[in-house]
Amino acid sequence: MLDYVYGHDLVVGKFVAELIPHCGGRDFGPAARTIGMIDEHGGLIAGLVYHNYDPEAGLIEISGACLPGANWLVRETIRRMYQYPFHVCNCQMVVQRTPASDERLLRQLAAYDYMFVKVPRMFGRGKDGVLCLLTVEAWAANRFNKRFKHHLTDDALLEEAA
């Protein structure tokens, strides 16, 4: 059973940044917002960071990481992951930068109907990346979300995430 924590942006942001090799230990800035996943022992095992928010364009970037072997990517986590950008921030698109070599993550994102744009050298010389883009319409129409459509306006969850 996971607990979800909001409002611990510096702690969760630092945790995520330390687990993502291309972050180089840098944080996500003071405007970043986070969701942390806490295991049954009270330890932080995963986190999501929302950063580079552009309200005029309706874009937000998401980054995430977990401890090796952590069981955190469950249906409730996925629901909360997209509840914040699409229903709290009213974004029209989520952006995620992913190393082109991370085939496992790219397969997962494809299952949620992300679009992909390959960007040479996104992570440095010889380190290509992929801009992974998910529109609110693609999210609403994907097979995962159709099962949970009745939860999309869960007022208690929206208040918790705000």
Image (spheres, rainbow, N blue to C red):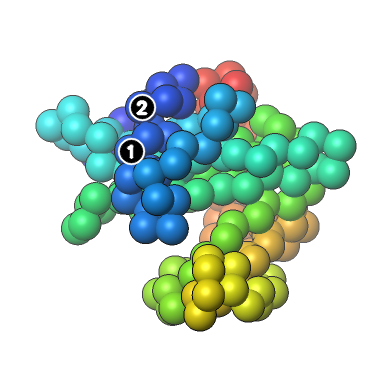
Observer-nearest of 68 and 101: 101
| Residue 55 position (above or below residue 5) | below
Where's residue 128, x and y in %?
A: 55, 76
Q: Which residue is mark 1?
A: 15
User: In the drawing, does residue 33 fall left or right of residue 103?
Assistant: right
User: Residue 70, position in %: x, y?
Assistant: 23, 52
| Mark 1 neighbour density, 10 Å: few (under 14) some (14–19) many (20 or more) | many
Identify the residue at horizontal 21%, vertical 37% (top origin): 39
Report the residue at 46% width, 20% height from top: 7
In the displayed structure, 120 sits above or below 132; it is below
72 is higher (above) or lower (below) than 14:
below
Where's the N terminus, which quadrant? top left
Residue 104 seen in this snapshot: yes
Q: Which SS class for mark 2?
A: helix
At label 2, the amino acid type is Val
Q: Residue furthest right?
A: 56
Residue located at (59% from left, 74% from top): 121
Please tell me whether mark 1 sits on a helix, a strand or a loop. helix
Residue 22 position by quadrant? bottom left
* Residue that label 2 marks: 11
